[in-house]
Image (cartoon, helix red, strand yellow):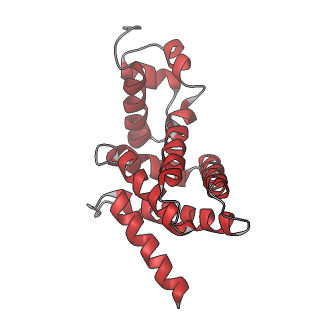
Amino acid sequence: MGRWEPNTEQRFLVAAIELFGEIGFERTTVAAIAQRAGLTARTFFRYFDDKREVLFKGSEQLQQTMVEALARAPLDAAPLEAIGAALATAGEFFNDERRPFARIRYAVVAANPELHERELIKMATLSGALAQALRARGVEEPDASLAAEAGIAVFRIAFAQWVSEAETRGYGEIAVESLARLRKLTAR
């Protein structure tokens, strides 16, 4: 088994998600992931604390990308417009190349209560970061938290749509459309 081969982390990610899809999360072991990747379990632990981490890799990067997009929104943008900028930028993160991985990940997380709980914590953390970015723009409470939570609701609904088998549109397009629908609903 090659230990210092290129793309080690990506090889682990691909191997893990393939196994999660084939035999399920619970039945997949780190040893099986390492074997599928052509690497060692010891090397796996240089990149991930455990097999759950494979599913949450990139969360910090996504959060940073969204917070930066919100901060770059025009200063006169309403809070939901700034949230819209963050959601649209998430579309760059959730590209067509990531969709197959995201579909399996979505199913695995939904089927496992422990992973689902972790996903909810991730969403709460993202909401807090977006609310903080809105406060830094001068949006006061409770408006900053309301806008951030609404953005997370849109994020989750758009993501569920994006990973559905029949969906072909990009995540950013779906998210922006979903935010527009929310605005219509609240204007009634």
Image quadrant for the N terminus?
Answer: top left
Q: Total number of numbered labels?
A: 0
Q: Residue at x 34, y 15 (%)?
A: 6
Up-down: is 69 above or below 178? above
**Can I make out residue 131 in this image?**
yes
Residue at x 51% of width, y 16% of height: 41
Residue at x-position 63% and y-position 52%: 113
**Location of residue 129 with respect to 57 vertically, above or below:** below
Q: Residue 79 vs residue 12: left or right?
A: right
Q: Is residue 183 above or below residue 57?
A: below
Q: Left or right: where does residue 71 sit relative to residue 149?
A: left
Residue placed farthest to the front in the image? 76
Residue placed furthest toward the left? 168
Measured as percent of width and height from the top left, residue 163 is found at 37, 57
Nearest the viewer among 122 and 68 is 68
- Residue 156 visible in image: no
Which of 51 and 89 lies nearest the eye of the viewer? 89
Could you tell me which residue is drawn at 49 percent across and 67 percent down?
81
Going by the picture, which residue comes out furthest to the bottom? 188
**Image-quadrant location for residue 152:** bottom right
